[in-house]
Image (tube, helix red, strand yellow):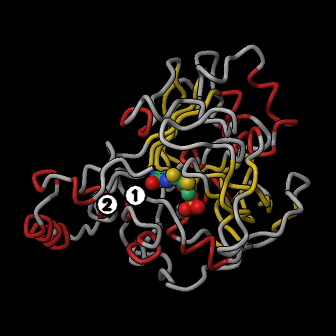
C-alpha cells in the first residue's frame, strides 16, 4: 500500500540528519532519550531488548476462535512486515526496530468513557488471562499469513474504561516519536498512524489486543508492546504500538483513509468482490507457500463471515468499503 516510493519523497519532507542528530544529542544530554507522549515516563529500560526472540508469556490458554490452518513460521511472521514507522520495505521493520525499547509503556485513554487516564502496560494486561488466537491475516496488498497471536479480547480491556452512550467509535493511535520511530521523520503518512472501529466492532469477541505471538512477547516489528488484531479486516486496520485509545461520537478517519480516500475506506472489510482501484482482491498470495504454490481465493470477511456478517446487515459494502 505504498503511496510514495522513497524516490518520490521531497528532500524538504525529510528531517535533515544533522538536525536530527543534534536534537537527539540534546535529548540525551537532558537525560531523556525519548520524547515520549507520556508524562513522567521513566526512560530506564526494565529489560534489555533482545534482538532474538522475546520472553515466553505465562499461562496462555488456547482459544476456540483459532483456525486449524497451519501457522506461518516464526521467520515468515517476523521478517515480512508492514510498519512504516520503521521503513517501507518488507524487511525494514525487523532491521530498523532492533533498538526500539517498548518498555516502559503506557496508553492514554480519552473521550466518552467514565474511566479515562494513563494506564501503564502492566496494569492493562495483568488482570487478564492471555489467549492464543491463531488467525488468518489478509493484507490489502493481496498477500496473507496465518499467525498464532497471544492477546486479550479487546472487549475485556475496553469494558474497564466504562465507555458511555456517546462512545460510538473507538480511535487508536500509535506512539508518535520520530526519535524512536525513524520512519516518522518521512512524510510517507500523516503521523501518528491512526485507526478506528465502530464500538460494536471493537467489542466483537474476535477483536484482539495482541501482546505476543508464538507464545512469546510481541517482537518490535510486529507492533510491540501491544497492537490490534481485527482478523476480518484488511491488515492495515490492525494498528501497532498503540499509545492512545479514544472513545468518540464522530467516526474517526484512519491514516490511510486520509492519505488516499479513493483507495482506503473506514470499514476495510476483506471482500473478494470489491477490487482495490489498482488490483483485484479476488485472490491472495499465501506467504511462505513457495513460488510455485500460486494464489488462492480470498474469502468474504477473510473466512470470518459466520461470526461478523451480522455487524453489517443493511450496509452497502460496495459503498462502505
Ligand atoms: N501499524 C502501524 N502503526 N504502522 C503500520 O505501518 N501497517 C499495517 C498494520 N499495522 C502498520 C500498522 C499493515 S498495512 C499491515 S498488513 C499489518 O500491520 C502487518 O502486520 P504484521 O507486520 O505484524 O504482519
In terms of image quadrants, where is residue 130? bottom right
| Left or right: 315, with 27 as reference point | right
Residue under the point 53% across and 49% down: 239
Location of residue 304 in the rendering, given as x and y in whole percent from the top left corner: 81, 42
**Which mark, by number, is residue 84?**
1
Is disc 1 placed on a helix, strand or loop? Answer: helix
Location of residue 73 in the rendering, given as x and y in whole percent from the top left corner: 70, 77
Q: In this view of the protein, which residue sits in the foreground, 198 or 27?
A: 198
Residue at mark 2: C-beta within 8 A of ligand 1: yes
Location of residue 56 in the rendering, given as x and y in whole percent from the top left corner: 70, 78
Of the two numbered discs 1 and 2 on the same chain, state the one appearing first in sequence.
Answer: 1
Q: In this view of the protein, which residue sits in the foreground, 180 or 87?
A: 87
Question: Disc 1 and disc 2: Cα gap in Å?
Answer: 6 Å
Can residue 225 be seen here? The reply is no
| Left or right: 99, with 49 as reference point | left
In terms of image quadrants, where is residue 156? top right
Q: Are marks 1 and 2 in contact (CB under 8 Å)?
A: yes
Is disc 2 placed on a helix, strand or loop? Answer: helix
Residue under the point 67% across and 54% down: 284
Q: In this view of the protein, which residue sits in the foreground, 21 or 12?
A: 12
Indicate whether 273 appears above or below 33.
Answer: above
Residue under the point 86% across and 51% down: 65
Indicate whether 291 appears above or below 157.
Answer: below
Residue at mark 1: C-beta within 8 A of ligand 1: yes
Indicate whether 71 appears above or below 306.
Answer: below
Residue under the point 16% across and 57% down: 14
- Within 10 Å of disc 1 (Cα), the crowding (few <14, some 14-19, many 20+) is many
Indicate whether 118 appears above or below 135.
Answer: above
- Where is mark 2, residue-wise? 183
Amino acid at each position: 500500500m505504498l503511496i510514495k516510493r522513497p524516490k518520490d519523497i521531497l528532500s524538504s519532507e525529510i528531517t535533515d540528519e544533522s538536525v536530527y542528530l543534534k536534537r537527539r544529542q540534546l535529548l540525551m544530554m537532558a537525560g531523556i532519550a525519548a520524547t515520549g507522549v507520556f508524562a513522567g515516563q521513566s526512560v530506564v529500560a526494565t529489560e534489555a531488548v533482545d534482538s532474538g526472540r522475546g520472553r515466553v508469556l505465562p499461562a496462555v490458554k488456547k482459544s476456540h476462535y483459532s483456525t486449524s490452518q497451519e501457522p506461518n513460521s516464526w521467520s515468515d511472521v517476523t521478517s515480512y512486515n508492514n510498519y512504516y514507522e520503521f521503513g517501507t520495505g518488507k524487511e525494514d521493520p525487523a532491521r530498523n526496530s532492533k533498538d526500539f525499547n517498548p518498555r516502559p509503556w503506557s496508553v492514554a485513554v480519552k473521550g466518552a468513557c467514565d474511566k479515562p487516564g494513563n494506564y501503564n502496560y502492566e496494569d492493562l494486561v495483568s488482570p487478564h488471562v492471555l489467549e492464543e488466537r491463531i488467525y488468518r491475516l489478509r493484507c490489502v496488498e493481496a498477500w496473507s499469513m496465518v499467525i498464532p497471536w497471544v492477546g486479550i479480547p479487546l472487549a475485556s480491556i475496553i469494558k474497564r474504561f466504562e465507555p458511555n452512550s456517546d462512545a460510538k467509535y473507538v480511535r487508536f493511535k500509535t506512539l508518535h516519536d520520530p526519535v524512536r520511530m525513524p520512519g516518522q521523520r518521512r512524510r510517507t503518512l500523516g503521523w501518528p498512524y491512526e485507526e478506528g472501529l465502530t464500538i460494536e466492532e471493537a467489542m466483537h469477541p474476535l477483536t484482539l489486543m495482541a501482546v505476543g505471538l508464538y507464545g512469546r512477547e510481541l517482537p518490535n516489528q510486529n507492533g510491540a508492546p501491544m497492537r490490534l488484531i481485527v482478523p476480518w479486516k484488511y491488515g492495515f486496520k490492525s494498528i501497532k504500538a498503540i499509545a492512545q485509545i479514544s472513545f468518540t461520537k464522530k467516526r474517526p478517519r484512519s491514516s490511510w483513509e486520509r492519505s488516499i480516500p479513493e483507495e482506503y475506506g473506514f470499514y476495510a472489510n476483506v471482500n473478494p468482490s470489491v477490487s482495490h482501484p489498482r488490483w483485484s482482491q479476488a485472490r491472495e498470495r499465501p506467504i511462505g507457500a513457495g513460488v510455485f504454490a500460486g494464489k488462492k481465493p480470498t474469502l468474504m470477511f477473510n473466512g470470518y463471515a459466520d461470526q461478523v456478517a451480522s455487524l453489517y446487515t443493511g450496509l452497502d459494502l460496495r459503498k462502505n468499503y
